[in-house]
Image (cartoon, rainbow, N blue to C red):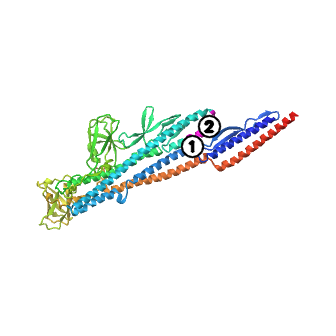
Amino acid sequence: MSTSALLSLGVRAMFANQAALQTIGQNIANANVAGYSRQEVVLTTPEGQFTGAGYFGKGVNVQTVTRSHNEFLTREAAAAKSQAFMDNTMQAQLSQLENVFPTGSDGIGQASNDFLNALVDVASRPSDPSARQVVLGKAQELAARFQSAGQQLADLQSGVVSDMKADVKTVNELAKQIAAANDQIARANGTSHSPNDLLDKRDQLVSQLSQYVQVSTVASSDGTVGVFIGGGQRLVLGSQAQELQVTPDPYDNSRAQLSITEANGTRVLDDSTLTGGSLTALLRYQNTHLQDARNLLGQMATAIATRVNEQQALGVDLKASAGGPLFSIAPPTVMPAITNKGDAKLSATITDGSLVPALSFVISADPTGTPDSYQVAVRPDGTATTMNKDQIEKAYGISLTMTGTMQANDRFVLEPVAAASTSFKRALDDPSGLAAAAPVVGTVDVNNKGTATVDSLYAVNPKFDKSLQPSTVQFGTVNADQSINYTITLADNTSYTGTWKAGQAIGNDPANNVDLGFELRLNGVPREGDKINLQPSDAVVSTNNGNAKAFLKLQSDTFVGKQLQADGTLSRGQTVTEAYAAAIADVGSRVQGAEYLASVSTTVASQAEATRSGQAGVNLDEEAARLMQFQQGYQAAAKVLQTAQTIFDQLLSIVQR
């Protein structure tokens, strides 16, 4: 064995240990760098050299530098992070939404009660201008509460669009960086060595991208990876990256949708195909939670405004005129799709505020071409149902009017109540315009023998016909169950009969086919032959409080959110207080659910990242031990080289002699 062979062994050993020390130093230097994977030198023994005395080793080779990487754990950590970011984004957004529905004295429910309670003084003093002014003040406060809540929802919507644009800008930049990393990796792929730092960089970019939208990756033979979103939509392929865009909703410019730019144009991404990431959370929050909140708030605003205005119209003000509107709201919003090709225009009006649902609809043409018939689907993903105009009005209290002709693919979005809260205003400024008087008054006949007196008398629906007054209510025989028969005789001599029991209304008894548009309630008990005279209230409007009492009844009236049942009857509905409490409970349950999911997914993501880093991360204690190991190896290799040098020098000195 020659001296040169010993020198070669020493040099190879020193180089191998030096390479190991350099790699260990790299690990230590990047121990706290996110996404860095621990690297390790792969050492191999070359084939020995044959001599007459046998095979002698030729030292050690540095084959390559590998990184500790587990593809499965990396994907799992990225997916868990994506889910955590989606849940945390949703939780943060819903927490802001919860502030729109305050409890206690700051809530809309309390403001509604304050407005109706203010009418107690008007009922006691119908002509008192100060009492009337207080009512108008409370009406203004109620309107301000609705407007404030509606504006907060509009601001939240603007914030969602702004956040989406910021996230999309970041996603596009990350996609370009992944494409650039793919290009560099593909160029280095022909060297037969793995570009570890580039691979770590690309994995880290994919992990960062997962914060905004969950992705799936597919490796290619050239070392590049394809990045896909939305159930297989290409985002990065090789060195080419597609761009995401935030585009306006085709029906409502204030809302946004997520689109991707392709060679043949821009394609909208459905949020149902997206999973994970903050962009997905923002889209779902906008399309579901924020829209539901607008509809819940708008349903209450619509029900209150229409019901109060209806009762106001049934009363008489201090000028002996029918009451004008007390509140005003915007009509239902109908938005045509930008892709509509026909000349059709659709408009809608509210005919029954108690039936209007907290929903939005997509209206399209009936494929059969039946006049005044449409396909109606609850937005965003409800099943379309064929309904004609009358069925829509009966079910939802909305009357549709169509002009022009709808084409087969034309679409309209109908939002009956979404704009109601923002547009809710007090329409009455003159205190004398408050219709506290009923259009009819009742007096007991002086010859009555019973104890019956008039408790309240007011109009309850437009069926009341003032021209049919004066009229009389004549009581007849007493039945075995202590009820008493009565006959109502109108001014045109038409008459209606019914049976009265304590607590029952007279004049508004549809179950007994008596529906004259007014409601008379009694205190005490009438006797046979007793009579109550009804007459117009024109001469006594300053002292009549009948309609003010009707207003007070609205506190317990269930006129919010009634629904048409399968048997044709209407559900009970809710009072204003109940409706607001239900809205608070609905939003609160969503917040609690989001908080729970955010807590769970954050824990899962932390555990997944800990598992990944446990395999791929740097352990400084291990690196310190390996540093000492290869340091000693390097010193030993240097000793071999030193020994070979000494032998070589001795041989040279012998030859020189």
Residue pointed to by mark 2: 194
Position of 127 relative to 91 (above/below): below
SS at badge 1: helix
Counting from the top left corner in percent of width and height, residue 371 is at 26, 38
For the residue carrying disc 1, how many other residues have a C-alpha within 10 Å: few (<14), some (14-19), or many (20+)? few
The amino acid marked with disc number 2 is: Ser
Quarter of the image containing the N terminus? top right
Q: Secondary structure at mark 2?
A: loop
Indicate whether 155 appears above or below 49: below
* Image x and y of residue 293, in percent: 37, 50
Name which quarter of the figure residue 103 lies in: bottom left
Q: Which residues are magenta?
A: 191-204
Magenta span main SS: helix
Disc 1 residue type?
A: Phe
Q: Which residue corresponds to the image point at 31% horizontal and 54% vertical from the top-left?
A: 144
**Residue closest to the far right:** 657
Number of marks in the rendered image: 2
Using the rendered image of the protein, determine whether residue 296 is visible from the camera's viewpoint: no
Residue 510 picture quarter:
bottom left
Q: Is disc 2 surrounded by few (<14), some (14 to 19) or many (20+) residues within 10 Å?
A: some
The front one of 409 and 43 is 43
Residue 13, position as x, y percentages in the image? 74, 40
Give me the disc on residue 72. 1
Quadrant in the picture for residue 341: top left
Q: Is residue 613 covered in magenta?
A: no
Image coords of residue 338 (percent x, y): 34, 37
Specify whether residue 134 is in view. yes
1 or 2: mark nearer the eye: 2
